[in-house]
Structure formats: structure tokens, C-alpha cells
Amino acid sequence: MDKSILVVLLHSDNIAYQACWEALGAASVLRGITGYRVVGLVLGLGIVSLAEEIAGQAGIEVIAIEDENLARYSAEGYVSALAEVCALQHPAIVCVPHTPVGYDFAARLAVRLHAACITGVEQVRSEHRVPIFTRSLQNGKIRADVRSDREVTVVSLQAGAFGFEKRDHAQGGFVTRIGVAVRLESTSGMRTLKKSARDTTLDRAETVVAAGRGIGSLDNVRLIEDCASLFVNSAIGGSRAACDQAYLDPALQIGMTGKTVSPKLYIACGISGSIQHICGMKNARFIVAVNRDPKAAIFQVADVCIVEDLTKFIPVFVEAARLGHAGAIVADSTTPAASDG
């Protein structure tokens, strides 16, 4: 039986998410390890043109599944359609972007297929031509290598972890249309709400000062604001944990489920450094991290690592900056342990 790697290509308004191209990049790595062919899959209504676009740029077969019950996303609808396609295609691996939609249905699909489910995959390597999937645990402090022992494996692929080069007019790409009967028995009353306006302050800022759960209280947000005030064209942001604690407005969230920023300077204050957050800021040119935990995962991507309680460090830093002595404060606060982290 010709085994395959099936890539579920998520989209909005007939535009593929960037995470889908990255999932195709991961599938290419898996193809090199296993030799299995890569097949894309687009679900929705009126999505044939999107399937053709992806097939042309990726040079692969893309299956288009259209049904009125797929016009809006639901986990039940996606699992129903995917289970039928998998029964026809017999994939060894199903790749899903690790987005809010992707990880909503991935585990449920794995249960339906009696498959293994490995989530948040950041890296894939070969061990005796068997794929080994690497994912983070404990907010990025631990990296685990996972191998599947099932015939079918559903993997969700972390955004920003894999690259993929689009090739216009690639040879060999084509679209196959398959009809399925999608019945929604437990889902009703769906609708999609969109923001009427988009805050672009974070997108334009050259310096971003971001707060994490480590700021400890709403009162300490003023420390983040004081630090940001030192820089021209600056903005404040935060991790999902800080926004969930209501320290910051959800519109200021940076990360996989928030905004993606690429400022010249990024100052992470009390942020542990989960892969979800790093996906949203890893393209910053220079990263400074302040955290009292010397083993914080954020130190793995930071250019300057400061092991200190931010409520102690930031007031001293702000005062020193206004007096012109901030460089000395940073040098004294950067420890060898932090730099090695």
C-alpha cells in the first residue's frame, strides 16, 4: 500500500495560514525520512481555487473537500470529513498546524483513527529511518523526543518551527476533488466574530517591552510602562499568561495566538519563554530578558540575560537610564549562569 503524509491546510477567507506552509515544510522533512508521498488537504466551501494555488506552489497533490457543513469551522465537521479521507488515503502521518483550530481537532481526530497524537512538535529527525518528534515541556525548560508506535500518527506542528519555500508554477501539482457526507449532530449555532479595528502600535514599534506572569500584579504594569517610556517609538505587550491574568489587554498579547512582532529591541520582563510566546517575537533583532529563574527558557533566545527580580531591576534601570548609566547596570546584572542559559 502506498503510504502518505497528509497535511491539513487551514485557511481563512480563502487565504492559507502561514502555519500551513510551515506544516508542508515539516512534511518535506518527514518525506526525506520515510519516503512517503506528501498530500495536502483543504476543507471548506468554494476552496478549489485555494487548493489549486497551493498545489501549484508546493508541487504536490492537494485534495479539495467541499461541503456546506464545512463552510464554517467546527471540530465535529473537520473530524468527520478527515476520517473519511483517511479511510481512502491510508496516511501514516497526519500533519496539522498547531494553531487554535489545529489543536482543537487534532486529538479528537487521533481518537477516531485509533492513532497516536503528538502535539506542539518543534523538530523532526531520523533515527534508523524512523521519525523522532521533539517537543517542549515545562514551559520550554525540557525538550522531549517522542517516537510513535502506532500505524497512524497525528502530529501538530508548532508555528515558526519549520520553513518552506514556495515555488510558483511548480511541476507536478494537481487538485483532486473528493465528496464526503459531513453531518453535524452535536454542533449548532456557529458564527465568527471579527474585530472592527486593528491596533498596529505593536507592529510599528521599534522597541517592545513585554510583560509576563512574573510581573506579579496589575500594579507592576507601570514598571513596564516606565521602561518603555525610555525609548522613542516603543510599545508594551505581553505573554498569554499576562493577558489571561488581566494584567494587559488581550489585544497586546504576543505569541502564536496573539501578535507577531519583529522590533529592533525586545525586552522580556518576567516571561518564562514558552515556544508559543517565542513564535511571536523570535525575529526581534536584539532580545533582552529579565527573569529571576536562571533556567528560564527565554534565556535560550536572549542576547542579554539578566537574572534578577524585575520589580527590583526595572526601577534601578529606569533611573540609571535617565542619568545615563544604564549600560553599567545591565553589565553588573548579567550573570555567567544567565548567559549560558
Image (cartoon, rainbow, N blue to C red):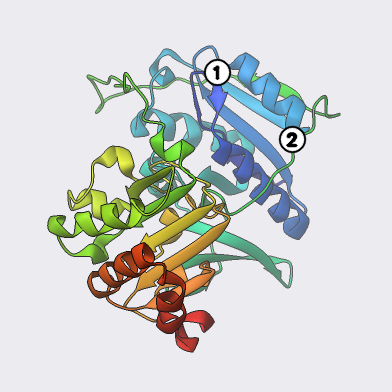
Q: Name the side, left or right, on which 265 lies relative to 57.
A: left
Q: Nearer the viewer, residue 156 or 233?
A: 233
If you read the primary sequence from the N terminus, does the residue marked by circle 1 or circle 2 appear first?
A: 2
Q: Residue at x 56, y 46 (%)?
A: 94
Q: Is 191 drawn above or below residue 130 in the view shown?
A: above
Look at mark 2 in the image and give the residue it sits on.
166
Q: Marks 1 and 2: CB-CB under 8 Å?
A: no
Q: Name the side, left or right, on which 172 lies relative to 286.
A: right
Q: Position of residue 56 (x, y in %)?
A: 76, 25
Q: Position of residue 297 (x, y in %)?
A: 44, 71
Number of numbered discs visible in the structure rendering: 2
Query: Residue extending furthest bottom?
Result: 336
Q: Nearer the viewer, residue 208 or 97?
A: 208
Classify 10 Å Cα crowding around label 1: few (below 14), some (14-19), many (20 and above).
few
Amino acid under disc 2: Lys
Q: Is 336 drawn above or below residue 276 in the view shown?
A: below
Q: Name the side, left or right, on which 224 lies relative to 122.
A: left
Question: Helix, strand or loop at disc 1?
Answer: loop
Amino acid under disc 1: Gly
Look at mark 1 in the image and give the residue it sits on.
179
